[in-house]
Structure formats: C-alpha cells, structure tokens
Amino acid sequence: MTDKQYQPKPDDRSDNVEKLQSMVQDTIQNIEKAHETMEFSSGQEKEQIIAKNKRREEAIEGFRSEIKDEYHNQ
C-alpha cells in the first residue's frame, strides 16, 4: 500500500456558498411540505411537526450565517 492511497482530498470551498444556498432552499421546501401535512395531522403529530419545523428554522439561521462567513472569505 502506498501513501498516495490515503492522502486527503484538497479543501475546495469554491462552491460552499452555492451549496449552502441550496440547503436553505431545500429546508424551506421541507417546512412548506410539513405545513401541508399538518392540515391532515392530529395532536401529537402536529406537535412533532411544529418542533421539527422550529429546528429547521434554526438550521436556516445557521446556514445563512455560514453563507455570510463564506462569502466574506472568498
């Protein structure tokens, strides 16, 4: 076995902003789908969806913060 086989890939951050923006859009779509699902859900299911959407909104805030950081570092 050679050392070349175990070398890490170079750190390429050139498209991080685009990836993060895509993740924000995907998460927003998931929130919207969950809202649609809530219409047909009952008590405990609604509570779970609300909690999950809250976590999704927190994740979006984190993504947007990362986008700003990555944009300024480019």
Image (spheres, rainbow, N blue to C red):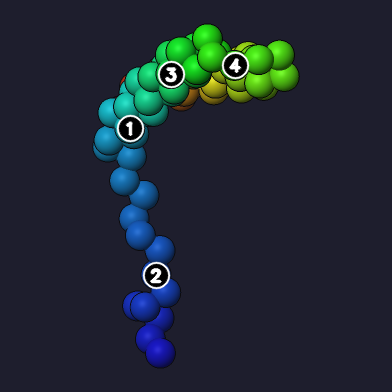
- Image quadrant assignment for residue 40: top right
User: Residue at 38% across / 19% down in the picture?
Assistant: 29
Q: Amino acid at mark 1?
A: Lys
**Mark pair 1, 2: CA separation:** 24 Å
User: Residue at 33% across / 32% down in the picture?
Assistant: 19
In this rendering, does residue 33 appear at all?
yes
Find residue 35 and report its horizontal and vertical position in percent. Answer: 49, 12
Q: Residue 33: which disc?
A: 3
Q: Earlier in the sequence, mark 1 or mark 2?
A: 2
> Mark 1: which secondary structure?
helix
Q: Are the residues tagged 3 and 1 within 8 Å (C-beta)?
A: no
Find residue 6 and report its horizontal and vertical position in percent. Answer: 42, 74
Q: Residue 7: which disc?
A: 2
Residue at the spot of label 4: 41
Q: Is residue 39 above or below residue 65?
A: above
Q: Amino acid at mark 3?
A: Lys
**Mark pair 3, 2: CA separation:** 42 Å
Report whether 14 appears left or right of 3.
left
Q: Earlier in the sequence, mark 3 or mark 1?
A: 1
> Mark 2: which secondary structure?
loop
* Circle 2 Cα neighbour tier, 10 Å, few/some/many (<14 / 14–19 / ≥20): few
**Mark pair 4, 1: CA separation:** 32 Å
* Circle 1 Cα neighbour tier, 10 Å, few/some/many (<14 / 14–19 / ≥20): some
Residue at the spot of label 1: 19
Q: Earlier in the sequence, mark 2 or mark 4?
A: 2
